[in-house]
Amino acid sequence: MPVFIIIYLLLELYVSLSLGEELGFIGSVLWILATLSIGMITLRLEPFTIMENLQAVGVGKFDMKKFQDATMASFLGAILLIIPGAFSDMIGFGLLFYTFYLRFVAKITPAKPNIYKTKGEEDVIDVEIVERNTNNNSSIEC
């Protein structure tokens, strides 16, 4: 595990320095402020994103796996955009792209009518049976 952290930090340093060299100081500051703003806006809209994803689960456009993937990708993408660094920004944008991909693919696919019905529930006819007492014992024998 520490090896992955070291590799991530080295990649973050390399990509950030390369981007900073290309953009210059002012461009790098603007890049950091822009990604920070996008991350903060995305994080503030996260409750609405979760509600949209829950509604998509309710109408059958998302299953629980897609709901979990879309919610976690949106949240982690926003957090990675807030963290300064070009490599974390690229991962954050990738996660947000994945979230939008799941939303638009889910909207293109038709909704299932109702995923919570049991098989054969539509074929059942509800009937009430009334039994009549056929033994009229009006007289009592001794």
Image (cartoon, rainbow, N blue to C red):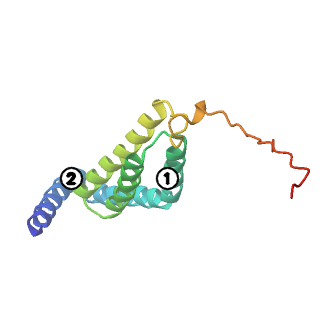
Q: Residue at x 29, y 55 (%)?
A: 89
Residue 105 image offset from top left, x and y in percent: 41, 34
Instruction: Tell which of 75 and 56 is nearer to you.
Output: 56
Residue 126 image offset from top left, x and y in percent: 68, 37
Q: Nearer the viewer, mark 2 or mark 1?
A: 1
Q: Amino acid at mark 1?
A: Thr
Q: Amino acid at mark 2?
A: Leu
Mark 2 nearby-residue class (10 Å; few <14, some 14–19, many ≥20): some
The quarter holding residue 129 reads top right
Q: Residue at x 45, y 30 (%)?
A: 109
Label of residue 49 in the image? 1
Q: Is residue 95 left or right of residue 16?
A: right
Disc 2: which residue: 19
In the image, residue 90 above or below residue 6? above
Q: Residue at x 45, y 60 (%)?
A: 43
Mark 1 nearby-residue class (10 Å; few <14, some 14–19, many ≥20): some
Q: How many marks?
A: 2
Instruction: Tell which of 1 and 20 is nearer to you.
Output: 1
In the image, residue 75 above or below residue 108? below
Dividing the image into 4 quarters, which one contains the N terminus?
Answer: bottom left
The quarter holding residue 8 reads bottom left
Dividing the image into 4 quarters, which one contains the C terminus?
Answer: bottom right
Q: Is residue 126 left or right of residue 16?
A: right
